[in-house]
Amino acid sequence: MSRRSIPEEQRSAENGGGAQVLSEPPNGTPGQASGGRRLALDVHGRLRDMILSGELPPGSALLQAEMARKLGVSRTPMREAFRLLQEEGLIDAQPDQRARVRAADPEDLDGVYGARIMLETLAVSMTAKSHATGDLERMREALKRMQEVAGKDQLDEWHAAHKEFHFIATKAVGPHLRRMLASLGEHSERYIRLAQLGEPSSWGRAHTEHEALLEALRLSDPDEAARVIARHLARTALNVLADIAPEYEPAATRTALGIVGNGQA
């Protein structure tokens, strides 16, 4: 599934409507400063996708000159993109040292999933009360695509369908919360990929949980939808933590689960 097949409204929510073309404005033209800023944001978005998807794995060295050549841009937007990535905590960049993609951080994972549990339970509860028949059909189609490529060498296709599934399941919220959910979802993608690599059986369990969420929405049951999504997100976080930092106590994830859920992860 290509990015173009993701609904336009979803792409707008995820990207803020930004362009993906990495082309620099002509020198001396009006609006050059704003054009340069847009280019830096495009470069940042491209590098961010490469990190979150695993194309640039944790620990990868990043050279500004090399990445500028690879993306066909100058060093100026690349420097700004690196600065933004460092502010997000996706790379470590010290003066006079080579920048590197940050390793998986248990505290970051715990915080991201604690926030996702709180916000997505709210969103699916609202969606369960206001969904349309067409929304459920789109979720079924996305779930079918996930199942068709699960466990195969088609991770990008699975993640595109997965993103669409969660987007529809939370679509009742307003634009500000939608942007927050999209940002958290993108940030957690690298951890979902780690879960899939670390535990092959996670494919089947995730499919069962997605089916349960779809059924709760079909029944317009906000309490069950909230319970399912909370446990689904917590399981992913706890499985990855068990692999990368078994000694870490996931306080945010467990606290969020305790607030919104009934039962244990």
Image (cartoon, rainbow, N blue to C red):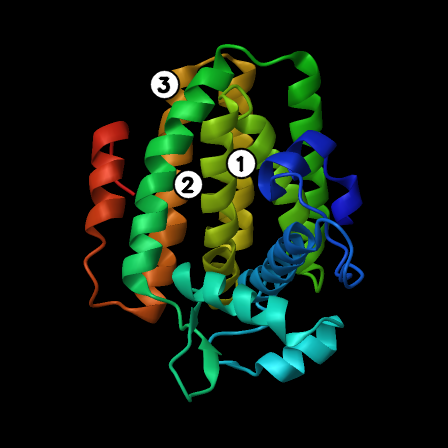
Query: In screen coordinates, is 242 left or right of 35?
Result: left
**What residue do we see at 78% from left, 49% from top?**
2
**What residue do we see at 36% from left, 49% from top?**
112
Q: Are marks 2 and 1 in contact (CB under 8 Å)?
A: yes
**First along the sequence among labels 3 and 1:** 1
SS under mark 3: helix
Q: Amino acid at mark 1?
A: His
SS under mark 2: helix
Q: Which residue is mark 3?
A: 223
Q: Amino acid at mark 2?
A: His
Q: Which residue is mark 1?
A: 210
Mark 3 vs mark 1, CA separation in Å? 15 Å
Q: Which residue is mark 2?
A: 232
Query: In screen coordinates, is 25 left or right of 182?
Result: right
SS under mark 1: helix
Q: Amino acid at mark 3?
A: Asp
**First along the sequence among labels 2 and 1:** 1
**What residue do we see at 74% from left, 47% from top?**
3
Q: Are marks 3 and 1 in contact (CB under 8 Å)?
A: no
Q: Do we see residue 50 in this rendering?
A: yes
